[in-house]
Image: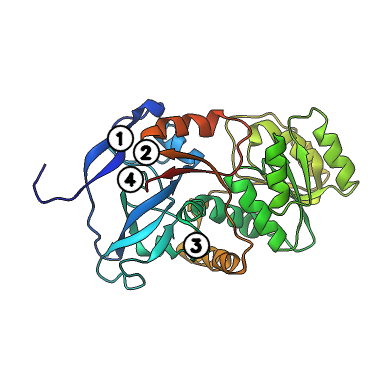
Amino acid sequence: MATGLKLMRAIRVFEFGGPEVLKLQSDVAVPTPKDHQVLIKVHACGVNPVETYIRSGTHKIKPLLPYTPGSDVAGVIEAVGDNASTFKKGDRVFTTSTISGGYAEYALAADHTVYPLPENLDFKQGAAIGIPYFTAYRALLHSARVKAGESVLVHGASGGVGLAVCQIARAYGLKVLGTAGTGEGQNIVLQNGAHEVFNHREHNYIDKIKKSVGEKGIDVIIEMLANVNLNNDLNLLSRGGRVIVVGSRGPIEINPRDTMTKESSIIGVALYSSTKEEFRQYAAALQAGMEIGWLKPVIGSQYSLEKVAQAHENIIHSSGATGKMILLLE
């Protein structure tokens, strides 16, 4: 290792595989920001399911090895590259992407993926905004093209993306229904914008939803686990209703005829299909939510860098998650 280089602790992945391939190293060189880049001292980093798929090698995104996972960091600007004039050292910020990886004490990011973090949100909340809120906004406003007065069912509403959908949908004038698998989860869903909540572990919960919405059905369903729920979703929809697939962990058999009678749609959403202009638009809307106060991330389980393998295990295999999973680096 060359002398004079500043070193940091970071998670490195040298081979694709299970959570055990996440290696904590303490001699990783702190990157230097180049043109239109900033270096952030990371206080917290969000953990997202997609990071487990990338790590396992089963995702279409395959980073060059070795790499550091993580896109959603919150912290303080440490250094600014040339032409990154929007920010200065000491600014509180959050990101929707990083260049060098977020599971680290310092992270490099392109300046257009970095946003000011208002004083009314702490760093843990800042690390919970990126993928969850930008995905939720894209799903509702871009993919589903929701209109005020429509109904939306958030299927799996107690996790990071689900709660973000509830808050945004309520702020935009929708009738919000949510599902969760625990009493605690149901309460949190109600506290974050849902008008009604249902327990998706009850065998007859679909009947309860049908009874609540009546003949008309539901205009939009935001679906976190399509491989389990898609068949039921198609039967819950209104005429012209749409299911937005945010998450799926395998195949499912459906009857396409279920889409015909109601002329309903199944639409997939992938945040990173968004253009720079769309990211700017989503950021403007979400920034307003932070200022007004309806955007309030709920923090779930918190882990140190040493416990990152456990975090990756739990985000996939622990059911009944409430709030957003976070790595703490302070």
Q: Do the residues under discs 4 and 1 have CB atoms within 8 angstroms?
A: no
| Residue 268 visible in the picture | no
Helix, strand or loop at label 4? It is loop
**Which residue has dot 3 on it?**
279
Helix, strand or loop at label 3? It is helix
Mark 4 vs mark 3: in front: 4
Q: Do the residues under discs 2 and 1 have CB atoms within 8 angstroms?
A: yes
Image quadrant in which you'd find residue 66 = top left
Residue 104, numbered circle: 4
Residue 192 place in picture, x, y as percent = 68, 52
User: Which badge, 4 or 2, is on the more N-terminal residue?
Assistant: 4
**Which residue has dot 2 on it?**
305
CA–CA distance between discs 4 and 1? 9 Å
Q: Do the residues under discs 1 and 3 have CB atoms within 8 angstroms?
A: no
**Which residue has dot 1 on it?**
24
Query: What type is the residue that disc 1 sits on?
Result: Leu
Q: Is residue 85 above or below residue 66?
A: below
